[in-house]
Image (spheres, coloured by chain):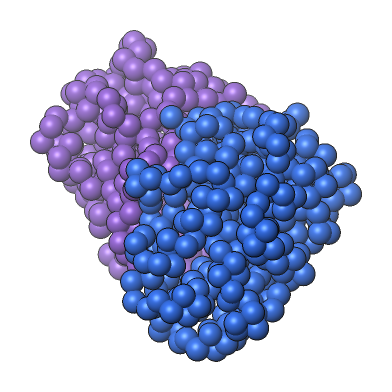
Chain colours: A blue, B purple
Amino acid sequence: MLHGVPFVSVSRGERIESVHAIAACAVRVDGEVLLALGAIDEPVYLRSAAKPFIAAAVVRAGAAERFGLDDRDLAIMSASHGGEPEHVAAVRALLAKIGAQPEDLQCGAEPPGVLHNNCSGKHAGILALCRVQGSPFAGYLEPGHPVQRAILAFCERVGDDRFGADRLGIDGCGIPVYATSLRRAARSFARFATLTDLAPDDAAALARVRAAMIAEPFYVAGTDRFDTDLLRAGAGRIVGKAGAEGVHASALLELGAGLVLKVVDGTRRAAAPAAIALLARLGALDAMQVSALGSHASFAVKNVAGKAVGTVAALGGN
Amino acid sequence: MLHGVPFVSVSRGERIESVHAIAACAVRVDGEVLLALGAIDEPVYLRSAAKPFIAAAVVRAGAAERFGLDDRDLAIMSASHGGEPEHVAAVRALLAKIGAQPEDLQCGAEPPGVLHNNCSGKHAGILALCRVQGSPFAGYLEPGHPVQRAILAFCERVGDDRFGADRLGIDGCGIPVYATSLRRAARSFARFATLTDLAPDDAAALARVRAAMIAEPFYVAGTDRFDTDLLRAGAGRIVGKAGAEGVHASALLELGAGLVLKVVDGTRRAAAPAAIALLARLGALDAMQVSALGSHASFAVKNVAGKAVGTVAALGGN
């Protein structure tokens, strides 16, 4: 069963009130394990951390050329965005390029609307894949739809994995998600970092998405979001992405490695403090970069009146 | 450090996606341990699970007689209520009895206002204690204020404990909270169950609050809330109360025992499934009662579109 090691504490006053355990794995592209905590061979859902691979599957099919997609389009396709006005405008622009309407998106509405759903860019990207394939929008959430088959095949190639029906779940936005081990996921992200051990067209698609995320970090998440701030602090050498239920995944370009972690209990608040601590331990972030990410590494627990009454941070020594 | 045992799973599709560990202790009033999981001697904050004792401290000072407080008043003083119209009206009525205004409450506003704050009844109760003491409303959140000293002294007597400054935290609503071990907390709830090993006035105050919670379960939490439904299913034999960061505490009247559990990672979603599993294990809930609480024992994880994609439930065997 999924298990981990205590890694992030939530304090109140002088006391630790709650503790989050994490499982994590970092591997080089050759499979050498740089770091292993907890259950690294237990299948977990990457959730939105897999979005860059979905975007790359869309690019791989030719959608970027066909519709003239730019960095912003590809960044929002890879995003868990905050629904800020610029994000909504970006999804609207992407839909216009592919000749689709907001009503075609099946991600579900997050107030005030479907474009504000953090996954709306990914769904717009999947519609672009429908167009390139000539497959219908109808049923695009179904595992058997040609777009989902293409995305699955892409992820299987990048991960050297086969996702059977027993690994299938449904994401918050309705699309299929497949469970994979942290070790295999970390190797996928290592390949995302090195662009090696991949078929040329797959590598080119991943390179295109990676460049877009680095060029347009705001469109990957948003104001004060960890993914955006990590892309900025990483200055082209770290491409990270969060997933729901406490997932973080990073491609570490200088190390030629990937890091994937899962907060065992699924709590979002622990993911960024854990990711920063592990990235520092791996040497992927230096002290200056860690300092720049300080507001994500530790932050206050506030009461209703807004007073700081505690802190969320990696445990000492991490 | 706080630690526990894996106890509640969150599934997605056929897979466990996240796992919550709990620490828990059940003891009889004589201190006999009926159940121990994880760190039972590590101080934890009970948070709102301590509200019945705060309400009893208010009663102990004479507020119920002085202001003619009824069951509904005492239930809302002990509540983490849902801000439903009846809850807001109950707090308003309580404030009127004690000659206070909503503006006197310092719990902070939860939209749309201060009366909707889940702690507003408790704060109104503390204002009643100010009135009885003849102490000012000003500064009633401060640990040194006479009302907080009276509440602390009451909790220390019930718990046979001494709360030093190193055990002090500030709750979400601004009042002081003190950390105590699950073992000691469970004994406090055992005394709440038996009303023995207590000074007569303390026992009488606890009896009055307990009767009010049993008589007015809706006012302790609200529609479809676990605390309310547990009081109803318990039919006068279980008086339970949730606290933030995954705390549940119950007085078990038939067993003459108390149960206190803490979700180690602080996640609310795991508390009720864990509490029901442990109450069943202790024999405090029978199969019919467990069935009546089924919607709290396991419930669906839903995606944005409202489709059930997984389940939160105690792990098999619990």
Q: Is residue B274 left or right of residue A50?
A: left
Residue shown at 25% from the left, 57% from the top: B223
Q: Which residue is nearer to you in this view: B98 or A222? A: A222
Q: Which residue is nearer to you in this view: A8 or A252? A: A252
**Above-or-below relation of A288 to B286:** below
Q: Which residue is nearer to you in this view: A155 or A285? A: A155
Which of the 4 image quadrants contains residue B288?
A: top left
Number of on-image labels: 0
- Note whether residue A68 is visible: yes
Q: Position of residue B75 (x, y in %)?
A: 30, 49
Residue shown at 64% from the left, 55% from the top: A199
Q: Is residue B128 left or right of residue B282?
A: right
Q: Position of residue B60 (x, y in %)?
A: 38, 37
Which of the 4 image quadrants contains residue A27?
A: top right
Q: Work out which quarter of the rendered image holds the C terminus of chain A and state it.
A: top right
Q: Position of residue B247 (x, y in %)?
A: 42, 37
Q: Position of residue B231 (x, y in %)?
A: 22, 42
**Above-or-below relation of A275 to B114:** above
